[in-house]
């Protein structure tokens, strides 16, 4: 009996040990599976963390890239101390170039101790644009795909890169594409005066055209919503229709065309706020100007001294050149418009043309086939235009006194006035003894500056004859209030063609003459 009980106890102990071993094996299996799941989850979390870190690093790299481009352009906000953008309401002002008018508070900002001006004696340059209301950074596909370098030392925005490498790498292409999304349209300008009311900005015709021309829109916004436009109205004008008509007549007859002065209702302007940002553009070394079809029809290619035309009329009115801009140049009262199609350096698609020599090339403008026979052959020569006026012999090659043989001479007009050689306009900085004379005729008007003590009556009539396309003895020039007449064909009291303008009663300041046929 005792042996049987001992055997049963041993059997129970053995079975207990076996069950314990079986439970241990199952526990080991369960523990291994749990470890595998834990390791998988740990790897997934590490991968997600790495992706988040990579995403943050890429986002930081994109912001760094954009800020470095802004730093290269020396962007400075003109808003408050927080760096907010300056948004102003536009109004129309007189001016043939790219000079805007700003409120006095901007001048205080520019001259403050905490705001450094441009280096090298260059004028203040601004980027003026219409903001895209739906813009959120980053919007450019080129910036969205930018990735941070694997090696922190591999930074393609390093200051050690030279201009050639920058051009080869197109490192500003994504930045310019982003600006194309940020703005519906933008261009560049300088300032003529700080006389605008606070919260307003005065823009001349060419700045308004650059912002509103559909062909000059940023490619990303050419198919977008139209930019609203408006015409300014003089708040001092009376409300009645009759008085409004009188006000418009006053505008038409006004001789106050001084750049920067208000031009009520003179042209359409954007009916939206404009953003103003200070930048520093590179000095231009070359550009291509393409005359408009109207300029070609007006025989732009037949001008005998293109260099003098551009130096006196173009460079004098422009401080910046931006691709897509349309600019005006004048020759003997005739207006020629040209489009800027190419500039060098091209990294920002805009340059300053102050204190620099620019190689200018003229592009060919195609007109309708039926007019091809009348179009003079375009020049292919390239030359330098300096920002200072020189007196070289007339010729077709810019910067040279030798004529270019591929240019066709202008077609003579039998109704045009006989050629009269008169003095060039006085220097821009000369104020004493200078009169801005405006000639109004049935087909339009023209204006020109004369030195009243040296310019002669024949110079005045030569200028008028170039506008009306008539012989100078077939018309007279008259003023309204009080009425005064000047005529070369008056039998009773003819004017002496050799007398100076001051002898003929023309004083310094401004004068408007109307053309009356005899």
Image: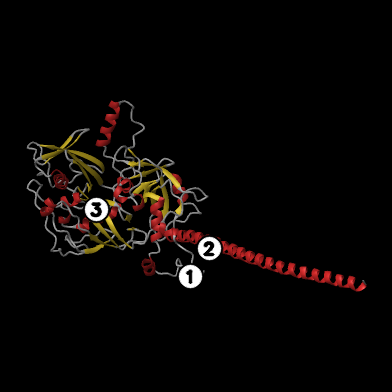
Report if residue 188 is visible in the image: no
Mark 3–mark 1 distance (CA, rounded to whole Å) = 43 Å
Task: Locate the N terminus by quadrant.
Answer: bottom right
* Crowding near the residue tagged with mark 3, few <14, some 14–19, many ≥20 C-alpha atoms within 10 Å: many
Q: Earlier in the sequence, mark 3 or mark 1?
A: 1
Q: Find the distance from the CA under tag 1 to the CA under tag 2.
A: 16 Å
Residue 215 left/right relative to 70: left
- Residue 195 percent location from the top left of the image: 39, 43
Q: Position of residue 280 (x, y in %)?
A: 40, 58
Q: Is residue 330 visible?
A: yes
* Label 3 or label 2, whichever comes before in sequence order: 2
Disc 1 target residue: 154
Return the residue at label 2.
54
Q: How many marks?
A: 3
Q: Secondary structure at mark 2?
A: helix
Depth check: give the residue in front, 502 or 262: 262
Tell me, for residue 495, which label it has, or none.
Answer: none
Residue at (30% x, 47% y) in the render = 214
Q: Which residue is mark 3?
A: 338
Q: Position of residue 67 (x, y in %)?
A: 47, 59
């Amino acid at each position: 009996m005792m042996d049987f009980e001992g055997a049963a106890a041993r059997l129970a102990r053995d079975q207990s040990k076996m069950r314990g071993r079986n439970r241990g094996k199952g526990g080991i299996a369960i523990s291994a599976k749990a470890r595998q799941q834990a390791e998988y989850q740990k790897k997934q979390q590490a991968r997600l963390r790495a992706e988040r870190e990579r995403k943050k690093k890429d986002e930081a790299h994109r912001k760094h890239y954009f800020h470095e481009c802004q730093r290269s352009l020396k962007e400075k906000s003109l808003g408050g101390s927080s760096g907010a953008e300056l948004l102003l309401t536009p109004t129309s002002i007189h001016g043939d170039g790219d000079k805007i008018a700003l409120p006095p508070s901007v001048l205080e900002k520019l001259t403050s101790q905490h705001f450094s001006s441009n280096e090298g004696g260059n004028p203040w340059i601004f980027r003026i644009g219409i903001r895209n209301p739906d813009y959120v950074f980053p919007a450019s596909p080129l910036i969205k795909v930018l990735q941070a370098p694997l090696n922190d030392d591999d930074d393609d925005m390093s200051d050690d890169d030279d201009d050639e490498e920058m051009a080869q790498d197109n490192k500003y292409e994504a930045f310019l594409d982003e600006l194309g999304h940020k703005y519906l349209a933008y261009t560049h300008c300088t300032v003529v005066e700080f006389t605008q009311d606070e919260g307003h900005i005065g823009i001349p015709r060419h700045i308004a055209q650059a912002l509103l021309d559909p062909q000059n829109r940023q490619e990303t916004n050419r198919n977008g919503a139209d930019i609203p436009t408006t015409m300014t109205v003089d708040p001092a004008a009376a409300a009645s229709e009759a008085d409004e008509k009188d006000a418009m007549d006053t505008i038409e007859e006004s001789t106050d065309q001084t750049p920067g002065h208000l031009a009520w209702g003179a042209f359409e302007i954007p009916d939206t706020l404009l953003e103003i940002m200070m930048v520093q553009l590179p000095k231009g070394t070359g550009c291509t100007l393409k005359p408009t079809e109207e300029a070609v029809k007006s025989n732009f290619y037949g001008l005998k001294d293109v260099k003098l035309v551009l130096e006196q009329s173009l460079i004098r009115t422009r401080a910046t050149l931006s691709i897509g801009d349309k600019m005006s140049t004048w020759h003997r009262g005739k207006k020629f418009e040209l489009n800027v199609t190419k500039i060098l350096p091209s990294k920002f698609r805009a340059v300053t043309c102050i204190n620099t020599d620019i190689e200018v090339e003229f592009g060919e403008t195609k007109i309708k086939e039926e007019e091809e026979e009348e179009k003079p052959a375009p020049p292919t020569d390239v030359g330098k235009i300096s920002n200072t006026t020189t007196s070289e012999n007339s010729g077709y090659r810019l910067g040279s006194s030798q004529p270019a043989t591929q240019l066709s001479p202008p077609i003579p007009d039998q109704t045009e006035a006989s050629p009269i050689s008169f003095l060039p306009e006085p220097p821009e900085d000369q104020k004493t003894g200078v009169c801005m004379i405006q000639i109004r005729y049935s087909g339009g008007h023209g204006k020109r500056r004369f030195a009243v003590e040296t310019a002669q009556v024949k110079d005045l009539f030569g200028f008028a004859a170039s506008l009306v396309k008539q012989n100078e003895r077939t018309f007279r020039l008259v003023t309204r209030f009080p009425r005064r007449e000047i005529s070369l064909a008056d039998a009773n009291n003819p004017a002496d063609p050799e007398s100076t303008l001051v002898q003929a009663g023309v004083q310094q300041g401004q004068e408007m003459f109307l053309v009356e046929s005899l």
